[in-house]
Image (tube, grey):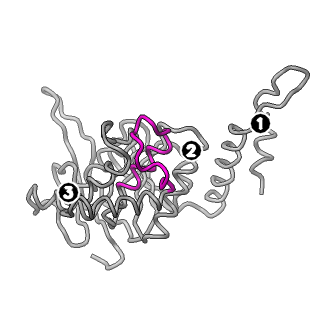
Amino acid sequence: MSADVIIRVEGVTKVYTMGEEKVHALRGITLDIVRGTYVSIMGPSGSGKSTLFNMIGGLDRPSDGEVIMEGFRFGELSSGQMAWIRCHKVGFIFQSFNLIPSMTALDNVAIARIFSGLTPAQARRDAAGSLEQVGLGNRMDHLPSELSGGQQQRVAIARAIVNRPEVILADEPTGNLDLRTGEDIINLLGKMKMDLNITVIFVTHERDIAYHTRRIIRLRDGRVVADEPVPDGLFLEAERTLAAAAAAKAAPAQPNGGRSLGAPSADARRAAVAP
């Protein structure tokens, strides 16, 4: 495997048995992920993108084929060795945040360091540093219920990066967020990729979100139907479109004879993102 390839997926299939029926979730997926890139896996519901996410993250095992990360062949590893990979090599971010409700933001992040073998004091020190990195230095002692959706997702990102993994896997991380907050999360993931030289793999069904990454792998019916770089023009337009939509959503309503101005017209929206 090339030194620049951090993940290789070789002929991976996944078949689930449901009663007498067999469901083919993945049908011979082969692809490479280059170190330090920002990649999206895109497809409609049922395309196999979440199953592929689980394979790359070692959360599930393929029916056939192999996943290799930095020389580790997942099929040859024990469950304990796979747990070590998930703890030290991969950081996970999910749509539903997956925070422990009874624990503060600091402890939700520190628990990942404790699982990696640190003492509670060391873990809390590192967790505080990660929360500072994602802009939550003043929210460390808050419970998840005391945080907004965007803040909860930032806690999840802090937890994902606290062990300094090689790869971040993000499964629809903006799905429960509004446009403005979603933009913040996308930009934050891009910043983490740059600052920490982490490979980011982003699962989404939204085209405008995928255009914020630099490569799109498109799945349909368990197969790769396209694997292509995001052209610079589309990447920049996605940045402007999301920023304009978020700004419009955040802007206060303006008086107009006592009536709402309403949503901008299609022409106005196009003008807002024109080069």
User: Please, what secondary structure does the residue beneath circle 2 have?
Assistant: helix
Q: Kindly check if marks 1 and 2 are in contact, taking CB atoms under 8 A apart as contact.
A: no
Residue bearing the label numbered 1: 266
217 with respect to 164 (left or right): right
3D distance between C-alphas at marks 1 and 3: 51 Å
**Mark positioned earlier in the residue sequence (3 or 2):** 3
Residue 140: percent from left, percent from top: 42, 50
Mark 1 or mark 2: which is in front?
Answer: 2
- Residue 228 in sight: no
Q: Is residue 249 magenta?
A: no
Residue bearing the label numbered 2: 181
Of residues 26 and 196, which is closer to you in this image? 196
Identity of the amino acid at label 3? Phe
Q: Give the vertical position of 23 relative to 189 (above or below).
A: above
3D distance between C-alphas at marks 1 and 2: 23 Å
- Residue 187 in sight: yes
The boundaries of the magenta stretch are 135-159
Q: Residue at x 68, y 37 (%)?
A: 249
In which quadrant of the rendered image does the C terminus lie? Answer: bottom right
Q: Residue at x 49, y 52 (%)?
A: 138
79 with respect to 243 (left or right): left
Residue 144: percent from left, percent from top: 40, 39
Q: Quadrant of residue 125?
A: bottom left
